[in-house]
Structure formats: C-alpha cells, structure tokens
Amino acid sequence: MSNQMTEPSEVLMSVRDLKVWYGGKGALFGNPDWVRAVDGVTLDILKGETLGLVGESGCGKSSLGRALIRLERPHSGSILFGGEDLAQVSPSRLRTLRRDMQMVFQDPMSSLDPRMTIRRIIAEGLVIAGVGRDERNVRVEELIQIVGLRKEHLDRYPHEFSGGQRQRIGIARALALRPKLVVADEPVSALDVSVQSQVLNLMKDLQDEFGLTYLFIAHDLGVVEYISDRVGVMYLGRLVELADAEDLYARPMMPYTQALLSAIPDGEAATGRSRIILKGDVPSPRNPPSGCPFRTRCWRAEARCAAEVPQLQEVAPRHWAACHFPG
Ligand SMILES: Nc1ncnc2c1ncn2[C@@H]1O[C@H](COP(=O)(O)OP(=O)(O)OP(=O)(O)O)[C@@H](O)[C@H]1O
C-alpha cells in the first residue's frame, strides 16, 4: 500500500509495515513482553521534502527515525531505499549506504565529543569514508562556512560555542558526506526561541542548496508547521494521520490530531474549536489496546474501533487518516 499516490521516481524511501519492538526478554517463557515502540508504520518519504513527525513523548517518533537510517534494528517490515531493503542488507553494505543517511540530534552538546576540535568532529565521517587529508581539509573549511561559522572556529572545542553554534556544527558534520536523507530529531528544542528560527532557516537554505530530504521530528507543533511540507502524526507506535502541513493544521481528520492541535496556543483559532482535554493516559506500548490505539481516549469511539484496526486511508485528496470515523 502506498499512502501518497505518487510516482515511484518521486519517492526516496518506502517504509512498509515497519515495527520496532524492544525487549522481548520473556520470550523463552512464552511472555515476550515487547515494547511496541513502532507498530506497523507504512509511509513514503518523497525526494526533497521535509516530512515532519509529531506526537506526544513516547509515541515512537525517535524509534521510527532511528530505524529508518538503521541506527535501530527493525523487528519486521521493510525500508526500501534506492532499490535495497535497509531492513535486510548486510552490515558492510549498510556502512556504505549510511553515508546517504545522516542524523542531527537534539542536544548538540552531548552529541559532540568535548575532547575533539571542531575540525575533527566535522571530518570524522570523511576519515571513515577514506577521503584523503587535502580534500578533507577543503571540505571541512567549506562546511564550516556553509553553516554560517568561520574557518578560525575549526580549531576550537565544542564548549567554546553557544547552543545554536553547536547545532550548526552538528549540521555541518551531518552534511559532510553529502547525504540524501537527514533525520533531525528535535534539532531545535534545546535552543532558545530566538535561535530556533535561525537554525530552522539555515536548514531550509541547506535543503534548497543540496537537494536534501528531511525527516523532522519534534513535539513543538509550531516548529513543525513552519518547516514541513507534509506532517505525520504518531500515536502509540502508529502513524494515525498524514497530510500536507497546511491541510493537516487547517483540517485535522483524526480525533487525536484534533486534540493535539487544539492544545497549541493559537489552536482555537486554527481549528475553530475550543481546547480538547483528553481523558486518561496514553496506554502502555507493552500492551496496546485492541483495534484503534486511540479508542480508549476517543470521544467518537464506537464498538468497531475496539474490534478493527483502522488502516491509513485517503480521506481527502493527499490527506490520510487511520480512523473509522474521520472528519
Ligand atoms: N532502547 C529502548 N529499550 C526499551 N524501550 C525503549 C527504548 N527506546 C525507546 N523505548 C520505548 O519505546 C517507546 C517509544 O519511544 P521513543 O523514544 O521512540 O518515542 P518518542 O516519541 O521519540 O518520545 P520522546 O519525544 O520522549 O523521545 C517508549 O515507550 C520508550 O520508553
């Protein structure tokens, strides 16, 4: 099943029924007790787009993002990238393919080795890829300037920079091997609001310049709306809605998305609804509800929602929702 109605040539990555489960230690005793962090996600990532991914803490955004670039091993499902299934490729092939897929992390301080100069940090991937010293130096000097810093900064250490500058360094490191896909996991949430938009604008500029595709993970719905072409909403390991950003924010179809959007400060104006307070907690991903994962908190739930898992279906042009009663 494809959920975009797109030509294959436009697709960078095709994810099918992907599951990322953790644990399973009790398997020997017939009680695997899996944490179903990602539980059957099907999704196409289109070339050159920014696909935003939102959802409450623990819904599986990071697990999905990490699995897509194989920092996490999927439990099952497929990740087609350039005709190969990343869920199946050998470790040596994966090392080669990884150059095309990089990650930008939330906290640039903990993701940059404090004992390494910025030059070494940015060059690390180039060293591993076997790029010679002279070419490496040229590339590193280009990269530091591309992200808005200066050559003199290369011989300093991470602690000498501000949060925003450190995230620029993290971005330079991610771009060193000219990747096709960048998974950015909460890349601005550790930064001051005033710095956030600078880093977001830099990411947009770099995307245009280098034809990058972004999977942009964040819990801040405003940030995601600003940067994304399309947005996917996750709940309890599943993708429950996916649409063009404007359409999703203006016309959320799935009750969970409606609740999520109603909670942003200008959400009332955006959705024409008052704030929806969800009852109860998110169920445990060890023991998700039958049928629709959201039905235990949904004010529109009916018997069918407990009996049948709703599949992601096109409920309006280019707008997909996994809900038995969308709208
Ligand atoms: N290595 C792991 N081992 C066991 N459980 C894990 C592991 N990593 C994540 N989880 C669990 O998987 C579920 C999904 O976590 P994940 O970090 O992917 O969600 P998230 O939406 O990115 O949340 P956050 O925004 O808080 O990072 C959570 O219940 C989490 O506790």
Image (spheres, rainbow, N blue to C red):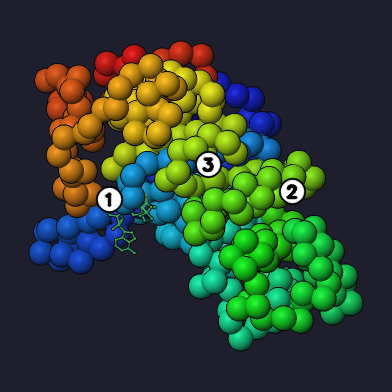
Q: Position of residue 128 (x, y in %)?
A: 69, 75
Q: Where is residue 108 in the image (x, y as percent from the top left)?
A: 56, 67
Which residue is at a point 21% across and 43% down the rendered structure image? Answer: 282
Q: Left or right: where does residue 232 sit relative to residue 76?
A: right
Foreground tag (1 vs 2): 2
Q: In the image, what residue type sits under mark 1?
A: Arg
Residue 206, labelled with which disc? Answer: 2
Q: Which of 57 and 89 is in front in this view?
A: 57
Q: How far apart are marks 1 and 2 (CA)?
A: 35 Å
Q: In the image, what residue type sits under mark 2?
A: Leu
Decide if residue 97 is in sight here.
no
Secondary structure category for the residue under label 2: helix
Evaluate if marks 1 and 3 touch, with contact meaning CB atoms under 8 Å apart.
Answer: no
Q: Quadrant of ligand 1?
A: bottom left
Which residue is at a point 54% across and 56% down the rendered structure image? Answer: 192
Secondary structure category for the residue under label 3: helix
Q: How far apart are marks 2 and 3 (CA)?
A: 17 Å
Residue 222 to residue 147: above or below: above
Q: Name the residue under label 3.
A: 223
Secondary structure category for the residue under label 1: strand
Callout 2 crowding tier (Cα within 10 Å): few <14, some 14–19, many ≥20:
some
Q: In which quarter of the image is residue 90?
A: bottom right
Mark 2 sits near ligand 1, with its Cβ under 8 Å away: no
What is the count of numbered marks? 3
